Amino acid sequence: MNRLLMIFALGLSICSVQSFFLHRRPRPWAPNLPFGHTTLVHDWVQLEYDWPSEAEKQRAIASGRYIPENNVFTGIKVYKGRIFVTVPRWRLGVPATLSEVIVKNGRPVLKPFPSWEMQNLNNCAAFQYVMSMEVDPKTGLMYMVDTGRINTFAPPGTETLNLCPHQIFIYDLERDCFVQNHTFPESVARATSTFLNDVVIDDQGYVFVSDAGGNGGLVVYDSRRDRSHRHEHPSMDVDTDPAARTFPTNTGYSNETYFFDVPMDGIAMSSDYNFLYYCVLTGFDLFQLPTSLARDPNADIGNAVRSVGRKLGQSGGITHGENNLYYGVLPRNAVYYWPKTDDQRRQGRPEHSVRMETQLELVQDTETLQFQDTFGWDDSGFLWLTTNRLLTFLDTEGGGLDFTGRRGPNYRIYRFYVGEQSYLKRGVPLREPREYKCSFRVILRKARLACKNESILRNIQCFFRAKRDPAIVYSC
């Protein structure tokens, strides 16, 4: 009997050990890196593209389609090691507004994504002005907002052009195809004033976009029902505090002060998808709004918005991880974070009433972190960031950026080890009421871009093969 008990106990021990190792799987990031460990991934004095040939590049320069000094990146997202960036068409001469960063001949270049054809101006089936995007790491779907307006910071002698209505495109990075797009009605995104800026998504198919134009606003897209609406609130407009519109650069070679009136800009989503956080560029407060109300086109959000606290300075991009909320502090050339869950524990408050009492510095550098623009995440515990000296870029009267290289790179991509992942890593992949397929409508619109392009024709053939066999592994 004792022997049987010993064998039974040994079996239980083995099962327990096996269960421990099965359930305590190693986290996907390197655990021995210190918090805040910084890596410079890429930098540029001037952005360069992956041109089909040198002759094509020279033709683009000669025609004005490519004016190198007018190209500055903002948005960034990372998916399975691939880096995507946006180059807004703030001025003329931007050949591609969405690209993938690749390394060619030892240097990073921007490869237009998904193709050169999708960058064509004056064609509303193509990208006109992509400011930002979001990628769901669970599905590989990329959500891209296109404001349809170019040359928004028009230099003398030129004018702002409203080429196309505001749109959102959804692209499947796994199958390499467009799956959906939506044109926002005028009541949601106004043709001459709306500025689709930053994007977050939830686990119910909703896309939330900050409107940094006019008096600000929140644009919401329901991808399952293919409909959209907007919300407005005084908190989404510029702060009336005169100090809020003052942006000192405090750089090593310039101490200029700039003045801007920009409304709602940064937007973040809590990792349980219950709350939106946002801030205006010309302002200091961080605001909170329940997503249950944001999703409702008929909701009155007036009394639901609350300020959780005052940030240490103005911010462009903000983002939420699994636990912390990260944001740039422009006057300090730094990235800070709010350890929200720690503040909740200390205050004994749920999220809907927690106050931002703790603000901690993640990284600061007067020279290299000038204008912390947009954040992204990978699967290895790293927070990614673009910096672009944007205030100096816009200061044409003060000389603008230096492209000689004497003052170092103008554009940088960083990653910082923070030991957590994106807010989107929690939950289960969104299950659509219909299976996503390559959209025949989008494929036909792409075909109109270049009807003689053999790859486009193959895409159409691929669509019909998929229609016959939905389980087929295909690439449109």
Image (tube, helix red, strand yellow):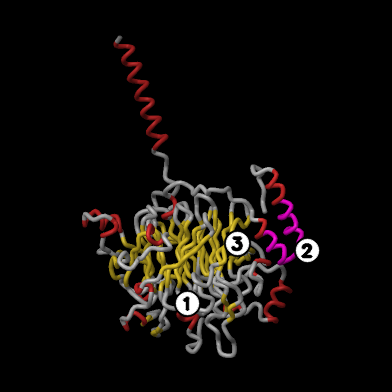
Query: Residue 86: x, y in percent?
Result: 55, 68
Q: Magenta residues? A: 443-462
Query: Residue 161: x, y in percent?
Result: 59, 80
Disc 2 versus disc 1: distance between alpha carbons? 40 Å
Write the residue at 32% across / 83% down. 242
Observer-nearest residue: 454 or 441?
A: 441
> Are the residues tagged 2 and 1 within 8 Å (C-beta)?
no
Disc 3 versus disc 1: distance between alpha carbons? 23 Å
Residue matched to label 1:
390
Numbered label tally: 3
Other residues around mark 2 within 10 Å, as few (<14) / some (14–19) / many (≥20): few
Q: Is residue 355 left or right of residue 272?
A: left
Query: Residue 313: x, y in percent?
Result: 33, 74
- Among the 4 quarters of the image, the one containing residue 71: bottom right
Q: Amino acid at mark 1?
A: Leu
Disc assigned to residue 457: none
SS type, badge 3: strand
Observer-nearest residue: 449 or 134?
A: 449
Q: Is residue 317 above or below residue 396?
A: above
Residue matched to label 2:
452
- Among the 4 quarters of the image, the one containing residue 276: bottom left
Q: Amino acid at mark 3?
A: Ile
Query: Residue 271: x, y in percent?
Result: 38, 54
Write the residue at 47% across / 88% down. 398
Residue matched to label 3:
102
Q: Amino acid at mark 2?
A: Lys
Q: Is residue 191 left or right of residue 104?
A: left
SS type, badge 1: helix
Q: Quadrant of the N terminus?
A: top left
Other residues around mark 1 within 10 Å, as few (<14) / some (14–19) / many (≥20): some
